[in-house]
Each structure stands twice: as C-alpha cells, then as structure tokens.
Image (cartoon, rainbow, N blue to C red):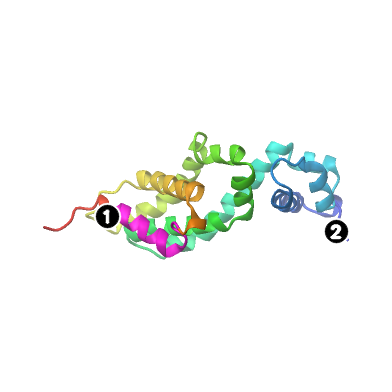
Amino acid sequence: MKPTAQDLSTTAIHDRILDAAAACLVESGYGTRLHAVIAERAGLSRPTVYKYVGDQAEIVAALFQREVTRFFAHLEPILLAHDRIHDGFVECVVFSVGYARRHRVLQTGLQDEPAVVLPGFTVHARPMIDRGAEFLVPHFERMVAAEPSSTIDPHIASEWAFRLVASLVTTGRRDAGDLADDDAVRAFVSGLLAIGTPQPV
C-alpha cells in the first residue's frame, strides 16, 4: 500500500504525481484528462493533485521541466569529458538526439500530439533555448578558452546545438535509416562543422 499524502514530503508528493503523469501520457496519450488517472495511479486524491501541481497544462509543464533537468544531469558528464569545442559540440548533439529519441514521453507526444509538442521546438522555443544556454554556455566557454585560436561564440554554439537537435529529433526519418544511429548523427554534425572550417591550401 502506498503512503498517503500526509506521510510524504512535498517533494515526494510532487515526484509521485509527475511519475504517474509520465506513465499516463505514454499509456493514454496527451489528449487524456489526466487528473483522475494520475490520482488513481499515484494513490492520491484529485484535490491533492491539483494542490501540488495544478491543472493539466501545469502538470505537463512541470513534467517537461523535470525531464529537462534530468537530461542536463545526464549530459553534463559528456561535456566535461571534452576540452575542445568541436568535439564537445558534436558529442553534445549526438547524445541529445539519442536521449530524445529514447524518451518515451517525448516520443509519444511527437507521434500522437505533434500540435502540442512541436511548438516547444519551433515557434515557442525561446524559453528552452535560453534555459539550454544557461547550462551549455559555461561548458562551451571552458572549451573555447582552452583553444586560444578559436573564434567561436559560445552563445551562438549553444543556440545552434539546440536548433540542430530540435531538427533531428522532430524530422529525422529513423525508420528509413536516415541518421538512424549515433555514428550517423556524429558524421552528419561533423560534416556540417566542416563546411565552415577553412581548409589548408
């Protein structure tokens, strides 16, 4: 038997609600009225779900923010393993694309409710770009500082990384073998970077 709300901390209640929301979105889709099914799955009352997270839009937004935080925690060791901006940028994009392609809640949304999910990658992407910059720019600044000849702007690199990942996640034809794995994505991103790199004569 699950502990009741009275036995849990605010953080534990919040996490239980979001865990239930993630499972419900994957199983039932984004069009489902979530409160009743979340409450049942989490072993909490519907008023408790409203009290701690809010309405359906707030639940989805809170879940999204939590998942982004978790994603950054997984991405950080990848970035820390690289000292050169070229390598760090490529591996950042490769990891991010793979992570997003494996993320069940995101993939369910892209498949079942693209009108709900896609604006966060396109016309309403600015908050996500800005949040990504808060995380990425310090890492890219460290890499650029290690290469005195580099002219790369870490802020531009951060935004470009987001836009590349967004494009590859939302339009990649994995079923047709187009950029189907990490090596293919790595080669693609490295090729893009090579376009802007002066070649020796």
Q: Secondary structure at mark 2?
A: loop
**Residue annotated with mark 1:** 194
Residue 172 position, x and y percent, is: 47, 51
Judged left or right of residue 50, residue 185 is left
Dominant SS of magenta comes to: helix
Judged left or right of residue 135, residue 146 is left
What are the residue bounds of the magenta stretch? 178-194
Q: Disc 2 versus disc 1: distance between alpha carbons?
A: 55 Å
Mark 2: few, some, or many residues within 10 Å (few <14, many ≥20)? few
User: Which residue appears at 41% of the width and 61% of the height?
Assistant: 184
Residue 183 position, x and y percent, is: 41, 64
Q: Residue reaching furthest left?
A: 201
Residue 88 position, x and y percent, is: 38, 59
Mark earlier in primary sequence (2, 1): 2
Which label is found at residue 3? Answer: none
For badge 2, the amino acid type reads: Lys
- Examine the structure image and report whether residue 150 is included in the region drawn in magenta: no
Q: Residue reaching furthest front?
A: 176
**Residue annotated with mark 2:** 2
Q: Residue reaching furthest right?
A: 1
- Examine the structure image and report whether residue 185 is included in the region drawn in magenta: yes
Choose between 49 and 141: the one closer to the eye.
49
Q: Is residue 157 visible?
A: yes
User: Which residue appears at 24% of the width and 55% of the height?
Assistant: 148
Mark 1: few, some, or many residues within 10 Å (few <14, many ≥20)? few
For badge 1, the amino acid type reads: Ala
Q: Quadrant of the C terminus?
A: bottom left
Q: Secondary structure at mark 1?
A: helix
Choose between 23 and 168: the one closer to the eye.
168
Judged left or right of residue 92, residue 144 is left
- Tell how many labels: 2
